[in-house]
Image: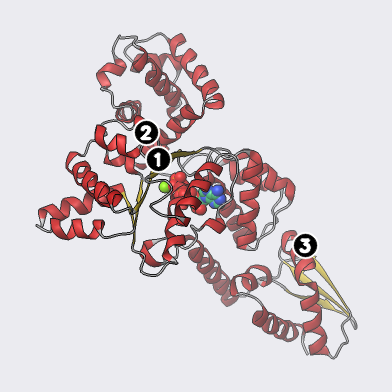
């Protein structure tokens, strides 16, 4: 048998034993590089695949080879070597990669519109989230009894939506349990549409007939009076019938501006739990879990490097990993620390679209809205404490996100001295390190900045 034919037959066998994703990931671009009587050298596209095949698939490959050659082959070696692909092979390759990536990025939605990945068993518990996790678990075990409502708050990308939906998944197991998951924006839009179309009653019925109401990002209900009113009644109705309510927000109830007092007090009735940025150990554990899920291996040194580089946000941590994997697949280049450093140096900032469009004016406006202050107040002369801190945040962000000079920052903020801007910048840097609240507020502001 020709080498090519033999290898195709081996692949045919292996394909039956492995999942499709695994098979494509590890055997794409492999071939028989040379064969002597009892020895086969398998060419593989990179060092990374080589070590993986040696560790995991050595035996299955040998077995397959032996069964096809009547035991002639006794040894296999792997060698990094690229085979020039024929045109159709290259086309197929690209198609496969695209498919895998699509499977990864398109969330598989299960019942009630919940993302299949957001379950308790895929959630890594660490210092920053253990309280929120325990509270969600408790609620999932005895809904409507332990903490009602449960209010989870914290910065962007720290797992609030994941936990919220995990409660939904857990209760979706019970028969006849009606679950509703919505963002507060969707709730608002549906409410407005319902009122417009004279379908208010349907709207009420839909939300008041559930056993579990999950509202994501409740902070966006701020300032919307009609919706708050409607939500207030929905809340009371469910609470009185011992139906569970879980809410998430980017900040604690007290810090949501323009939230009606009666809603605020209800949000504080039950349990309030925060999620904060994961420590290094948790970040490593999360990366390792994701690698396992994706059936991918990275050296420890690289995992530690990613974990120490991407600190604030788990979504970014996942993003970093996806980029590294994509880089490896597309370029057929081995992953080493040098590559990883290069890849990561481009991810701490949002990709195209965001950064370039941010001006000092939009920044001031965003911060003003975030703290519910008027722009005139922020750029005005008053030194009141309630204004001083948001002003320092603006100065910090202008430096970080717009790269303005200190004199320019002072100028934008009502003609202040450049030393004031410099002082503010360094003060906020210190606070980000030491104060969780500042850190979370800044990431929430950045999210608004880049998402508008
Ligand atoms: P948030 O709602 O707080 O902005 P998400 O819940 O959307 O954050 O989480 C962002 C991403 O990070 C999701 O893909 C989520 O699965 C993942 N993630 C967050 N926290 C954890 C964790 N503790 N363990 C595993 N994955 C996590
Ligand atoms: Mg979320």
Find the distance from the CA under tag 1 to the CA under tag 2. 7 Å
Query: Relative to 179, is 22 on the left or the right?
Result: right
Q: Secondary structure at mark 1?
A: loop
Which residue is labeled 1 in the image? 354
Q: Is residue 171 above or below residue 65?
A: above
Out of 262 and 411, give the one closest to the viewer. 262
In this rendering, which labeled residue sits more in front, label 2 or label 3?
3
**Mark seen at residue 51:** 3
Which residue is labeled 2 in the image? 358
State the image quarter where residue 173 is shown. Answer: bottom left
Q: Are marks 1 and 2 in contact (CB under 8 Å)?
A: yes
Tell me residue 27's x, y (percent). Answer: 68, 72
Out of 276 and 44, give the one closest to the viewer. 276
Instruction: Looking at the image, tell me whether mark 2 or mark 3 is earlier in sequence order.
Output: 3
Find the distance from the CA under tag 2 to the CA under tag 3. 45 Å
Tell me residue 57's x, y (percent). Answer: 76, 72
Its colouring scheme is secondary structure
Q: Is residue 320 above or below residue 444?
A: below
Q: Secondary structure at mark 2?
A: loop
């Amino acid at each position: 048998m020709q080498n090519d034919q033999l290898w195709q037959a081996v692949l045919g066998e292996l394909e039956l034993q492995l999942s499709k994703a695994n098979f494509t990931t590890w055997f794409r671009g492999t071939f028989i590089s040379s064969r002597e009587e009892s020895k086969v050298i398998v060419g593989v596209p990179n060092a990374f695949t080589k070590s993986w095949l040696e560790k995991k698939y050595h035996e299955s490959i040998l077995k397959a080879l032996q069964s096809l050659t009547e035991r002639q082959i006794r040894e296999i070696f792997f060698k990094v070597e690229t085979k020039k692909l024929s045109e159709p092979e290259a086309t197929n390759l690209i198609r496969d990669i695209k498919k895998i990536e699509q499977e990864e990025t398109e969330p598989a939605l299960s019942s009630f519109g919940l993302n299949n990945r957001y379950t308790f068993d895929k959630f890594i518990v660490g210092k920053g989230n253990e309280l929120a996790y325990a509270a969600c678990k408790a609620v999932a075990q005895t809904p409507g009894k332990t903490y009602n409502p449960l209010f989870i708050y914290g910065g962007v990308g720290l797992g609030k939506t994941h936990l919220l939906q995990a409660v939904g998944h857990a209760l979706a197991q019970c028969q006849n349990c009606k679950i509703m998951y919505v963002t507060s924006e969707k709730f608002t839009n549906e409410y407005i549409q319902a009122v417009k179309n004279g379908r208010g009653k349907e709207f009420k019925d839909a939300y008041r007939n559930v056993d579990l109401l999950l509202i994501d990002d409740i902070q966006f209900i701020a300032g919307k009076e009609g919706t708050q009113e409607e939500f207030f009644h929905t809340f009371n109705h469910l609470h009185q019938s011992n139906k569970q309510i879980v809410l998430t927000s980017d900040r604690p109830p007290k810090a949501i501006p323009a939230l009606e007092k009666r809603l605020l007090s209800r949000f504080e009735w039950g349990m309030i739990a925060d999620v904060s940025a994961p420590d290094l150990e948790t970040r490593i554990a999360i990366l390792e879990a994701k690698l396992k899920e994706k059936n991918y291996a990275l050296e420890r040194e690289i995992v530690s490097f990613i974990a120490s580089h991407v600190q604030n946000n788990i979504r970014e941590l996942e993003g970093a990993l996806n980029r590294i994997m994509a880089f490896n697949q597309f370029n057929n280049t081995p992953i080493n620390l040098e590559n990883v450093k290069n890849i990561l140096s481009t991810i701490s900032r949002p990709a195209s679209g965001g950064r370039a469009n941010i001006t000092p004016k939009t920044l001031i406006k965003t911060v003003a809205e975030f703290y519910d202050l008027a722009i005139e107040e922020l750029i005005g002369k008053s030194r009141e404490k309630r204004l001083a801190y948001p002003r320092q945040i603006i100065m910090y962000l202008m430096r970080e996100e717009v790269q303005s000079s200190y004199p320019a920052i002072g100028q934008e903020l009502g003609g202040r001295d450049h030393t004031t801007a410099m002082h503010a910048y360094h003060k906020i840097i210190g606070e980000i390190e030491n104060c969780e609240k500042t850190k979370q507020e800044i990431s929430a502001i950045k999210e608004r900045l880049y998402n508008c």
